[in-house]
């Protein structure tokens, strides 16, 4: 039997099932109820936040109310209905495609109230295609509704945008993604450690589709209990305790221990740049927790991870953490242009651990008239 990916099977099918975009769902639902449906909409946002799903749900609510046969709603949600035409602008960029759309739009819908065009990645259309589409959007047939979806709004001409009702789809909060993943795991007959679900949700970077795809990879092995260890083995996500060991070594100015922890992360499969990026993210979380307090929502850490981070926070001050983040970022860029990446990496780890001593040395030299570290001694007059 063919397998259907989780991201497709657990796609929202009604306004009430939408995760993370409730204000938009409520507005579109009320527009239908009050008879204030516009002729064109522009759905903007990053990938995997529900733009196409919302377009299908909106189309279903317009053309397949409760008095319609259920097969109409099913066809719309599959993208196979005759009155709801989905177009991938990435592969239909030319003016000929736009003209064909315009010509067909003159015909009334076969069984629904509206003829609805969902144009995905609309920013990929050529200028000529946009110009052809513009005329129809200026004076659209009363039975036509356009729903334009894009991840790059700035590439959509202002003349097109001005004729649409625009909706901004936000990145979905990690906590809401994690709650949805927990429901999916339960419905799949498995169980998962809350720490794992939160980590997967965070790796989704605000995209529900990306998070579900990651979960799909974890569940493909047939494990009935998903743990953070599985996440480390399959996706290369570093074990929290090992990262904490490196953070504590940096806080204690222990370069030997820091090098050992960093080497262990590399042997677990992480690349040099992944280790530095992980460190930068952790330093950022510590900085925000220290500045905003333990309950801040600016840090997306679950219970166990937040508790661990809060135990490390007192070891650093905010000024040092900003410097440590800058070091990680600078070295990450330098690794791309060096013939000795491991040497540069190890030097960076030692520098992180000895940052306080470097700072003290700089102050001492400045106080004695020696100038900045590495500069020539000041000449005596």
Image (cartoon, grey):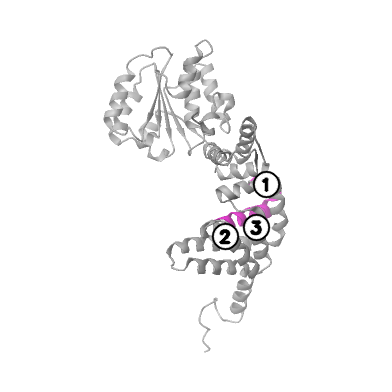
Q: Residues within 10 Å of mark 2 (few under 14, many from 20)?
A: few
Residue 37, placed above or below residue 241 = above
Identify the element where label 2 is drawn. Answer: helix
Q: CA distance from mark 3 to mark 1?
A: 24 Å
- Which residues are drawn in magenta? 277-299
Between disc 3 and disc 1, the foreground one is 3
Q: Which residue is mark 2?
A: 267
Mark before the other along the chain sequence, 2 or 1: 2
Asked whether residue 64 is in view, the answer is no
Between disc 3 and disc 2, the foreground one is 2
Identify the element where label 1 is drawn. Answer: loop
Q: Which residue is mark 3?
A: 242
Residue 354, placed above or below residue 171 = below
- Judge whether residue 296 is colored magenta: yes
Asked whether residue 97 is in view, the answer is yes
Between disc 2 and disc 1, the foreground one is 2
Residue 296: mark in rendering: 1
Residue displayed at 62% across by 40% down = 223
Residue 181 placed where, x, y %? 61, 36
Residue 206 placed where, x, y %? 55, 41
Does the magenta stretch mainly form a helix, a strand or a loop?
A: helix
Q: Residues within 10 Å of mark 1 (few under 14, many from 20)?
A: few
Residue 178: mark in rendering: none
Farthest residue, direction top: 67
The one of 363 and 226 positioned closer to us in this rendering:
226
Mark before the other along the chain sequence, 3 or 2: 3
């Amino acid at each position: 039997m063919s397998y259907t990916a989780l991201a497709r099977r657990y796609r929202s099918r009604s306004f009430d099932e939408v995760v993370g975009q409730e204000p938009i769902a409520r507005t579109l639902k009320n527009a239908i109820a009050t008879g204030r449906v516009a002729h064109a909409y522009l759905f903007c946002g990053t990938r995997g936040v529900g733009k196409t799903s919302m377009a299908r749900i909106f189309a279903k609510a317009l053309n397949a109310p409760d008095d319609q046969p259920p097969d109409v709603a099913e066809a719309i949600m599959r993208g196979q209905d005759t009155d709801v035409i989905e177009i991938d602008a990435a592969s239909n960029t030319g003016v000929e495609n736009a003209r064909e759309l315009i010509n067909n739009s003159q015909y009334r819908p076969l069984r629904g109230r509206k003829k609805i065009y969902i144009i995905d990645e609309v920013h990929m259309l050529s200028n000529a295609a946009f110009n052809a589409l513009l005329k129809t959007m200026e004076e659209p047939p009363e039975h036509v509704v356009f729903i334009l979806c894009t991840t790059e709004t700035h590439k959509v001409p202002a003349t097109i945008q001005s004729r649409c009702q625009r909706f901004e789809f936000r990145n979905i909060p990690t906590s809401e993604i994690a709650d949805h993943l927990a429901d999916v795991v339960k419905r799949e007959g498995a169980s998962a450690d809350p720490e794992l679900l939160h980590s997967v949700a965070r790796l989704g970077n605000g995209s529900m589709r990306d998070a579900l795809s990651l979960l799909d990879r974890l569940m493909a092995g047939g494990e009935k209990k998903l743990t953070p260890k599985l996440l480390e083995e399959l996706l290369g996500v570093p074990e929290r305790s090992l990262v904490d060991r490196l953070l504590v070594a940096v806080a204690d100015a222990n370069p030997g221990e820091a090098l050992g922890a960093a080497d262990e992360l590399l042997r677990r499969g992480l690349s040099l740049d992944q280790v530095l990026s992980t460190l930068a993210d952790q330093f950022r979380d510590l900085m925000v927790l220290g500045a905003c307090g333990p309950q801040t929502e600016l840090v997306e850490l679950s219970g166990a991870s937040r508790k661990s981070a809060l135990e490390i926070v007192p070891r650093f001050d905010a000024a040092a953490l900003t410097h440590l983040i800058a070091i990680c970022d600078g070295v990450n860029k330098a690794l791309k242009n060096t013939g000795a990446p491991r040497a540069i990496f190890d030097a960076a780890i030692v520098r992180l651990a000895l940052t306080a001593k470097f700072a003290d040395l700089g102050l001492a030299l400045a106080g004695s008239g020696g100038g900045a570290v590495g500069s020539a001694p000041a000449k005596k007059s």
